Amino acid sequence: SKMRPNTGTGYRFSLYYLHEIRKQSMPAEIDAATRADIAFYAAQGYSQEGIAEETGVSRRTVRKYLDLTREEVAASDRPRETLCAIVRGEYDWQRGDLTADEGGYMSM
């Protein structure tokens, strides 16, 4: 007899909850301008709740993007420039680097 993958109710139930847990751990997608606003308001000393009110996103989403921002800045060889690029909305989140102008320098 051939071995078949477990596709019973318990297996589907487990996959459903795994999917739900993953969804909860991922922040809602937001545009670069909102990401920049989150970093800007944080730099101004706003609380996560205050940032959420100003930007119109959930506090959980604010927390997740602040965590992502901290991780990107900490991993950068140029943390100050990275944070500035994030606040200006010039950071390339897909590539994980700064957006440079033609001369190879970040515009200020």
Image: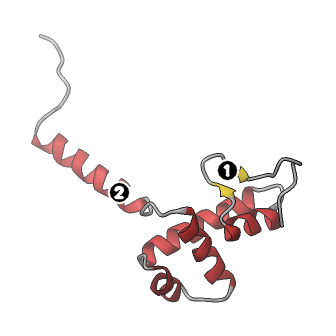
Q: Residue at x 81, y 67 (%)?
A: 80
Figure quadrant of the N terminus? top left
Q: Determine whether the residue tagged by mark 2 lies in a helix, strand or loop.
A: helix
Position of residue 81 relative to residue 54, above or below, is above
Along the viewing direction, whichever of 95 and 33 lies nearer the viewer: 33
Q: Is residue 84 left or right of residue 89?
A: right
Position of residue 72 relative to residue 102, above or below, is below
Q: Position of residue 10 (x, y in %)?
A: 14, 44
Dot 2 crowding, Cα within 10 Å, few <14, some 14–19, many 20+: few
Q: Residue at x 22, y 49 (%)?
A: 16
Q: Residue at x 83, y 61 (%)?
A: 107
Q: Is residue 34 left or right of residue 105?
A: left
Q: Tag 2: residue type?
A: Lys
Q: Residue at x 59, y 76 (%)?
A: 37
Q: Is residue 92 left or right of residue 84?
A: left
Q: Which residue is mark 2?
A: 23
Q: Mark 1 against mark 2, which lies toward the viewer? A: 1
Position of residue 38 relative to residue 91, above or below, is below
Position of residue 80 relative to residue 54, above or below, is above
First along the sequence among labels 1 and 2: 2
Q: Position of residue 59 (x, y in %)?
A: 44, 79
State the separation of the CA atoms marked 1 and 2.
22 Å
Q: Tag 1: residue type?
A: Gly
Dot 1 crowding, Cα within 10 Å, few <14, some 14–19, many 20+: few
What is the total number of numbered labels drawn onto the structure image? 2
Q: Determine whether the residue tagged by mark 1 lies in a helix, strand or loop.
A: loop
In the rendered structure, are the residues bearing label 1 and label 2 in contact, judged by CB atoms less than 8 Å apart?
Answer: no
Q: Which residue is mark 1?
A: 96
Q: Position of residue 78 (x, y in %)?
A: 83, 59
Q: Position of residue 49 (x, y in %)?
A: 48, 87
